[in-house]
């Protein structure tokens, strides 16, 4: 699948000009296909995330962009130029790895300036650009320290400064936050997003963490078995997943079996568990009489006591079998007919508020527009 790109809020030819383009790239190792015909375009200054489980081909794709692996077939273009068999040092890219890859015997300043020195940049210019890069990652005044004297988060910033000091057109990031604790990861996610906007370079980021992808990305490419399953903005991926894999991989989702009884314009009318009627936006290719899957997020479903009088909403009846207090919200699990379950997330209110009782028959409701029909 090939698609253009434009960052949110950008207009004009510069925003639409491709920074990186993959044309039907494939990579095989022996008899194993790691990447199976990926085509996509990444816009100038865009933050694109390759998201997927281990072994889906995302890191191999990144390595082919960087020149660490060569495609078995297909071509990588950067700045409109085919990369062919160019090695990494001859491509306008820099890569940040999870393990930082800093030289322990060099100071922070020497680590950052190393690439400039190898490129023959003069001493005075190296010093200026090194200071500038460290200020960019909010680490001034640490040039004389050794990497071992810094925290994990600071070392990661030094690795970013070293990658940015050469002013690459494209920055490749291979799970660079994987070794950090949760709180520091969250802080670094915001730092990376801000850096992307500040320096204007194209960021291509690899992760298996869905929250990380949703937080930072302009667009996300969800991958599975060497192929892109869906490419779109975080909101598109979350609100309108194209198939069950995407819906299940990004966020928590309820899946209900539905038999499509009728079609009404953009809507499908069907029967869910126990013959209960549901109305949902139809997917491409939906046919009368087919079995499909209804996907709806737990926060889109409401217990009847919380819901307005909306007869046009979907109403499902079940027995409440689980209630879990999770701080900001509570999670309820209802057992529907045909032994299906539906999960409801409800924001917690006042302490002592009356809660639905386990074992009681309860009705849940949701807006038809909040659900997606998947005919995988």
Image: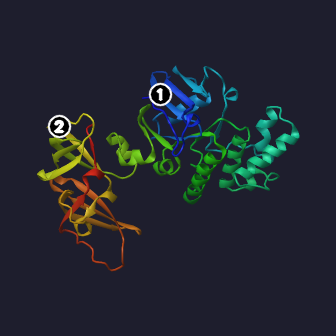
In the rendered image, residue 50, in percent from the top left (x then y), is placed at 50, 39
Determine whether the residue tagged by mark 1 lies in a helix, strand or loop.
strand
In the rendered image, residue 57, in percent from the top left (x then y), is placed at 48, 33
CA neighbours of label 1 inside 10 A, class few (<14), some (14 to 19), many (20+): some
In the rendered image, residue 297, in percent from the top left (x then y), is placed at 32, 54
**In screen coordinates, is 293 left or right of 110?**
left
Q: Earlier in the sequence, mark 2 or mark 1?
A: 1
CA neighbours of label 2 inside 10 A, class few (<14), some (14 to 19), many (20+): few
Extreme residue in the bottom direction: 352
Q: Which mark is residue 289?
A: none
Residue 371 can be seen, yes or no: yes
Quarter of the image for the N terminus: give it: top left
Q: Return the residue at label 2.
A: 290
Residue 108 can be seen, yes or no: no
- Marks 2/1 in contact by CB < 8 Å: the verdict is no
**What residue is at 18 percent from the left and 51 percent from the top?**
278
Determine whether the residue tagged by mark 2 lies in a helix, strand or loop.
loop
Comparing 98 with 268, the one in front is 268
Tell me how far mark 2 sits from mark 1, CA to CA. 32 Å
Q: Relative to 302, does residue 52 appear above or below in the rendering?
A: above
Extreme residue in the front direction: 12
Q: Relative to 315, does residue 133 appear above or below in the rendering?
A: above
**In screen coordinates, is 322 left or right of 157?**
left
Q: Return the residue at label 1.
A: 39
In the rendered image, residue 45, in percent from the top left (x then y), is placed at 59, 40
């Amino acid at each position: 699948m090939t698609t253009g790109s434009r960052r949110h809020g950008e207009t004009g030819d510069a925003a639409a000009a491709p920074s990186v383009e993959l044309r039907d790239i494939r990579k095989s190792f022996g008899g194993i296909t790691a990447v199976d015909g990926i085509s996509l375009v990444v816009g100038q200054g865009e933050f694109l995330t390759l998201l997927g489980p281990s072994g889906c081909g995302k890191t191999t794709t990144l390595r082919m962009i960087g020149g660490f692996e060569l495609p078995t077939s297909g071509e990588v273009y950067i700045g409109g130029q085919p990369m062919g068999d160019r090695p990494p040092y001859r491509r306008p890219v820099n890569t940040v790895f999870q393990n930082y890859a800093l030289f322990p015997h060099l100071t922070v300043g020497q680590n950052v300036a190393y690439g400039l020195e190898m490129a023959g940049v003069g001493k005075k210019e190296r010093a200026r650009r090194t200071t500038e890069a460290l200020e960019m990652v909010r680490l001034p005044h640490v040039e004389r320290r050794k990497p071992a004297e810094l925290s994990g988060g600071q070392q990661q910033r030094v690795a970013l400064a070293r990658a940015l000091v050469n002013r690459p057109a494209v920055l490749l990031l291979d799970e660079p936050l994987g070794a950090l604790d949760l709180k520091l990861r969250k802080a670094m996610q915001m730092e990376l997003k801000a850096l992307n906007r500040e320096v204007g370079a194209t960021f291509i980021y690899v992760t298996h963490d869905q929250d990380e992808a949703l937080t930072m990305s302009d667009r996300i490419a969800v991958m599975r078995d060497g192929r892109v399953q869906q490419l779109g903005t975080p909101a598109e991926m979350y609100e309108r997943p194209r198939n069950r894999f995407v819906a299940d991989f990004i966020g928590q989702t309820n899946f209900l079996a539905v038999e499509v009884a009728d079609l009404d314009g953009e809507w499908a009318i069907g029967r869910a568990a126990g013959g209960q009627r549901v109305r949902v936006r139809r997917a491409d290719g939906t046919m009368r009489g087919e079995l499909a899957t209804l996907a709806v997020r737990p926060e889109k479903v409401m217990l009847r006591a919380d819901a307005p009088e909306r007869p046009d909403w979907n109403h499902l009846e079940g027995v409440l079998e689980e209630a879990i207090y999770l701080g900001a919200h509570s999670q309820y699990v209802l057992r529907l007919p045909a032994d299906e379950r539906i999960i409801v997330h409800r924001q917690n209110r006042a302490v002592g508020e009356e809660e639905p009782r386990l074992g009681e028959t309860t009705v849940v409701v949701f807006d038809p527009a909040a659900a997606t029909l998947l005919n995988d």
